[in-house]
Amino acid sequence: MKDAPGTRDYDWWLIAILLAICTLGVLEIYSATQGSSLAGMHMKQIRWLAVGFILMFLLSRLDYHLILDQAWILYLIGIVALVSVLLFGHTRFGAKRWLPVVGEFLQVSELVKLIIIIWLARFFAEVRTDELSLRDLIKAGLLVGLPLGLILKQPDLGTALVLMPLLIVGAFLGGLQWKHAAVFGLAGLILVGSVFYPPVSKHILKPYQRERITSFLHPEDDAKGSGYQLLQSKIAVGSGGFWGKGFRNGTQNQLGYIPVRYSDFIMSAWAEEQGFKGVLIALGLYMALLLRLVQNAQRAKDRAGMFLVMGVAAALGFHVLVNVAMVIGAMPVTGIPLPLMSYGGSATLFVFLAIGLVMNVRIRRFVN
């Protein structure tokens, strides 16, 4: 067995897939913003990507077992950071989600997702039985529920939702019993159903969040208001056809009809300009990314490593699923970005740090 990992131990196929997705994102950000007041945003994204790659390699060199040993300290740091956001955070678009860090605004909840992945990996790895007890499930649920509640207070429904598949996938792999799954599944259905029931939803969601639910169901009822984003996105996706209108030739994109076309709705802009074949390429890359993650999880040397990698896969898979469903009108608008394609510093750093954990697990699979 090897004593120390080397560069050959990295998953270079995974890195190649990351580079390909990043390239698509930079090209579409350039197309969506060139000639507007947002021109030059693609260069900012390239800088975030460069920082992300550096952090990914740095994190991969630190033994993940040492990181897991500090899981509780990281968890407490995350809670303190989320409370600090509520007290001192920067407000933008009516939400208080950012803290100023080195001249930039950092969205703390993005890094908290990484901390929750680490904490859940340690928690479920330490369960030494084949089946999780109800006590274990409740403990995990409460400790995930605390940061989830703080993120909802910002408010940031999209990021809060991402914590749920982390818990679900971890519990499933850790030995979730069917009777417990049935109970929690029923509770989840009741909770989701209550969101669509006005007398209850008004106590759970903000007014704009309730509008997103109603506009998702009937966007044409308020085509110039709450349904505008969804209708314009669907028009862009449909008008791209199979071949697309060509790079920088998308009318919905270039004329600015697609909302937040460089971030949350970047897939709409991509679909209009590159068509169905371009969407297939992008989704094929994401599928390849997820398959490589699952493969790395299968090859992990221990349960903790497996849980880490599958936590990353759950987070990224949920991001892709919800974002793509959102832009075609299959799900309400939640503001969940498309990993590595959407513009955003904090979201980009989260993805690269998460992949750094994956590389960390991979390169130590044969280490003594």
Image (tube, rainbow, N blue to C red):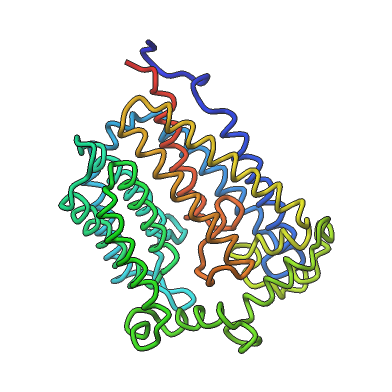
Residue occupying the point 23% across, 43% down: 123
Most foreground residue, 95 or 235: 235
Residue 11 vs residue 118: left or right?
right
| Quadrant location of the C terminus in the rendered image | top left
Give the vertical position of 107 relative to 176 (above or below).
Answer: below
Residue occupying the point 53% across, 39% down: 53
Furthest-top residue in view?
Answer: 1
Give the vertical position of 322 relative to 13 (above or below).
Answer: below
- Give residue 325's position: percent from left, percent from top: 58, 63
Most foreground residue, 168 or 52: 168
Most foreground residue, 224 or 6: 224
| Quadrant location of the N terminus in the rendered image | top left
Residue 363 placement: quadrant: top left
Furthest-left residue in view?
Answer: 135
- Give residue 202's position: percent from left, percent from top: 36, 85
Residue 180 vs residue 90: left or right?
left
Residue occupying the point 60% across, 60% down: 324
- Give residue 284's position: percent from left, percent from top: 65, 44
Give the vertical position of 68 relative to 166 (above or below).
Answer: above
